[in-house]
Image (cartoon, rainbow, N blue to C red):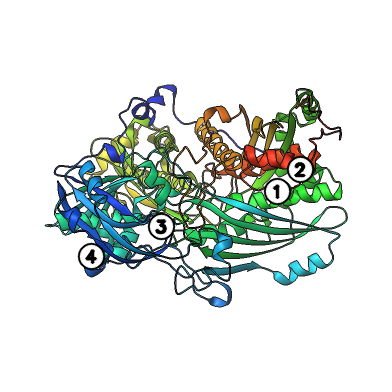
Amino acid sequence: MNGNLLRFGSDRDALCSEDEPLLTGRARFTDDINVPGQAYAAFVRAQVGHAELRGTDVSKALKMPGVIGVFTGRDLVADGLGAIRPAASFPGRGGKPMLGAAMPPLAVDRVRYDGEPIAIVVAETAAQAQDAVEALIVDLDELPASSDVERAMAPEAQPIWPEAPDNVALDWTDGDAAAVESAFARAAHVASVRLLDTRLAPSALEPRAAIGQWDAAAERYTLVAGTQGVSVVRKLLAEGVFKVPPQSIRVLTYDVGGGFGMKVQAYAEYAALLYAARRVGRPVKWRASRLESFLADTHGRDGVLEGELALDARGRFLALRVRTFVGLGAYVSTYAAIFATNNTKNCLSSVYVIPAIQIDVKMVLTNAAPLGPYRGAGRPEAIYLIERLIDSAALTMGIDRVELRRRNLIAPSAMPYKAPNGQVYDSGEFEAVMDKALALADWKGFPARRAAAERAGRVRGIGLCSFLEVAGGILDETVDLRFENDGTIALRTGVQAMGQGHASTFPRLVATRLGVDVSAVRLIQGDSDEVPVGTPSVASRSMMMAGSAAALACDTAIEKGRGIAAHLFEAAPFDIEFRDGRFRVTGTDREIGILDLARRARTMPGMPEELAGGLDNTAKFVSPQMSFPNGCHICEVEIDPETGVVTVVGYTAVDDVGNILHLPIVEGQIHGGVAQGLGQVLGEAVVYSESGQLLTASFMDYMIPRADDMPDMRVGHHCVPCTTNPLGVKGAGESGVAGSLPSAVNAVLDALAGQGVRHLDLPMTPQRVWAALRHGQVRTASGAPVSSGER
């Protein structure tokens, strides 16, 4: 293990980051932006989960004070607008095409989820627009709703789309079914689990907001919105909705207050705002309320996970069989086809030798808000399933759960290791990571801590999760590196900061490789007119993909600089060396700094054609495969038997994210991921009623973890560099979720095991835990019942 914590810049470079504007209130989020002459919008939304839309009476609203215009879905259709199609689509079992279920900007003939936008009202003020919303009369013929997977797949369920009478948008399979069946036939033991994967609300700190503008002279739209990448939003709006070339829409993103995958989507409201701006001839601004965020932001997770693990008599894994049913919501979002299928499939081998794997996936349409990527996006689901299967097998077979994992870990000597699900792991030392976590968590000291908890009348449990996830997503990314006239270096990239610290990492990366002060480097993002077409910040890919492209661009600039310096000094290119930001003729004192050379190159006569353009260049990095962040997380909980309250009293995370370029940012990402994973365990859950009404539409109803719910975390690192990108990084944004969700569930069930509780569905709320404990006496680990007085 010879990875590094690569540190960029000096102490005085600390100001070259996003910290100061964010901490001093000078950051500019979308709602901070105003444009001259802007009007304001509010949306009329469906208040039922499923209905035929017979019509909308806008006459009274048009007469309200300040109202400039009111537009419905039928207005947009009449003007030739289309719908927002998913960016990813592929066939399923037997080559059957996936149902795209494109998202209309405004509902036309049917509403399919509670909160779907039906009409947009534009007025002089936001208050006037909202008042006019109340005056619209919507004629709905309510239909039966199926807001979860099991209801939607029931034989009597109402079809949400006529093209999918069974409400299945895609039936997909992968793996060697014959090999899996053969392995199960000879297995000495089979563990099986069925897990509910609760629907979650991403709950970004900054609600969505947008401004739509139309330039009649240029016949061009401009959208200001918080996104995770401007290119895909522009593409989907241009191609699907407005049917114009992408260059006819400019997308601008300023500071973004969290996204977690939710801000990838080209939302219906954005299309409606652009249309309204064109119709009224003025910019139109909108900001979502928190209620609207719960109703209409893409949600995360949601589904049913089923799996069986075949083992031999010694506890060696033979095969894994998985079935998942993913609740898509009413429409197929941008990358739903990827995170519902391949993201889960790619993680199923995890850190273990599993000779044969098969997965079947059904993407199920439901009367709920569209499902989008949410931190981990299909990968935590795979790890949760595997780790529960292992704990279940260990308990049934009487094998220590750490030992069972150890017997099946992939050895470092097996690298590169080709897993049966198609991934090729380039690196990893999984046993060393687990051992480091066990030591850091004081696993051996747990029995004493459990005994102390019992004496205090509490039940204590500990759980671990060894995991591997995939990072990278779409495996190509382009950046543009330019040496500007003002003496600065500009890096243009299509990935978008939303809290990951891009301004603290990308300029330092460029500055370090080019040997210049970090203050000379500018990061340009969030403007589709400026940045290269690329993939959003998803799949823990920004540094792996855009960072690697930036490294290649720096290398290209240096190689071009050798040629230009050779021309300047009348020397051979191989006699030019580059060190500490300066080009030198070897063995002489003739030298020039890279920034001075870039300036000279603009006017230098007689330059060879291949050196035209100076040091400026565009670089594209294509990764041969994903990277594979991995780790071992250990969670320790205590339960109050009187109330069922679960308290996380200890948490240890040891991660291998490859080379670490900025330690505080990596650890911050791990902390955030852990918090979101624990949130799903402790209480987060989006709940719809049987009629499709959203019941968890505020933070009064939707539990989100607070700072005092989080334990002190022990974070360690075991850096094994990735061998498939020039930076050796593996991605750090989502491993916290992959480790925390399974380890926390395992810890709670370990605490409840003495009571005979083998399974408990998410979320593990006090009510559910208390009810599980009431099924019998609360017993200590030794089997002795806790007396009523101790309770």
Residue identified by numbered label 1? 387
Residue identified by numbered label 3? 48
> Which comes sooner in the sequence, label 3 or label 2?
3
| For the residues bearing labels 4 and 2, Cβ distance under 8 angstroms | no
> Which comes sooner in the sequence, label 3 or label 1?
3
> Which comes sooner in the sequence, label 2 or label 1?
1
Residue 570: image location, x then y, percent = 32, 43
Which residue is rendered at x = 58% and y = 35% of the image?
4
| Distance between the alpha carbons at the discs numbered 3 and 1 | 38 Å
Point out which mark residue 775 bears: 2
Look at label 2 and name its amino acid. Answer: His
How packed is label 4: few (under 14 Cα within 10 Å), some, or many (20 or more)? some
Residue identified by numbered label 4? 75
Q: Nearer the viewer, mark 4 or mark 1?
A: 4
Does residue 244 show up?
A: no
Residue 84: image location, x then y, percent = 36, 62
Residue 487, image quadrant: top left
> Which comes sooner in the sequence, label 4 or label 1?
4
Q: Quadrant of the N terminus?
A: top right
Does residue 103 show up?
A: yes
Look at label 3 and name its amino acid. Answer: Val
Q: Is residue 757 left or right of residue 43?
A: right
| Distance between the alpha carbons at the discs numbered 4 and 2 | 58 Å
